[in-house]
Image (cartoon, rainbow, N blue to C red):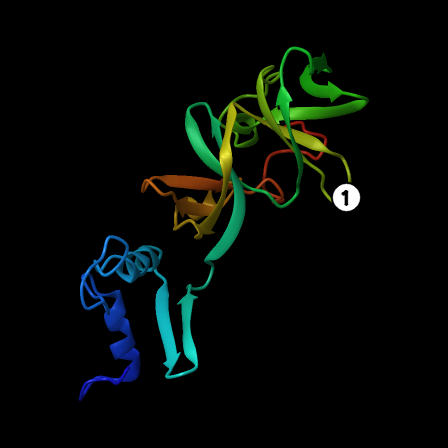
Amino acid sequence: MTAPDGLSDADAFQLVTRPGFSTAKAPSPMSGRGVGMDVVKAAVDAIAGHLVIHAVPGRGTRFEILFGGGVSLVQTFLVRSDGDLYAVPSAGIARVVVLDEATATREDGRIHWTSGGDDIPLVSLQEALCRLAPDPGPTRGSVLVFAPPDGGRWGMAVDSIEGRRELVVRPLPGPLSSLLGYSGCAVLDDGSIALVIDPSGDDVPVRRDGSATS
């Protein structure tokens, strides 16, 4: 590809991200309709990223997506709690289990998940975020089991798990950055915002034994 007069190679390469651009002489049912890289460019711009295209004739093309400081790709579980959707990083989660009447037991005023010799104290997500006063916890739903390096497994109880997703996580802007228990936020496919939970942070009001701090 040769850049027109007055246009750098880098700017010329960006033409492929323009809506309607196509290298096909005529559209077909599968290609040539100008939909593709413009969608990628729009998605990158939406998260304040930058798309860079490098190309060398006869050797190939490389696409780079650059993110600003603080932005990261995180594997998460999307969970629902009290009607709201949250993202929980999968790092640190040892397993996911189902909580029901057969596995829920009450001990020392708190619900535990018990099965096959396992006994894991639970805290609800809403309680962990200090949005709910300490209570015994739910007896039905799903549980994300955490196994910190320092030991003391505990489980976070949620209403349901909506699936796994790799998300682009950005820091919360001030004054939201002062909220306890969150590591950032992410834009979902439908344009809605999901707050990202940080269950490993020292400021999260959950002890490693699964009980809430005061």
Q: Nearer the viewer, residue 35 or 46?
A: 35
Rendered position, 66 above or below 86 = below
- Which residue is at a point 36% across and 72% down the rendered structure image? 52
Image spot of residue 67 (x, y percent): 42, 63
Q: Is residue 214 visible?
A: no
Q: For the view shown, which residue lies furthest in the right direction?
A: 117
Q: On screen, 132 above or below 74?
A: above
Give, as a three-letter code, the residue at label 1.
Answer: Asp
Q: Please provide percent x and percent y for residue 151.
A: 78, 39
Q: Quadrant of residue 119?
A: top right
Report the front residue among 4 and 74: 4
Tell me residue 164's x, y (percent): 52, 39
Residue at the far bottom in the pictured view: 5
Q: Which residue is mark 1?
A: 150
Instruction: Indicate the quadrant containing the C terminus: top left, top right, bottom left or bottom right.
Output: top right
Left-right relation of 67 to 105: left
Which element carries disc 1, helix, strand or loop? loop
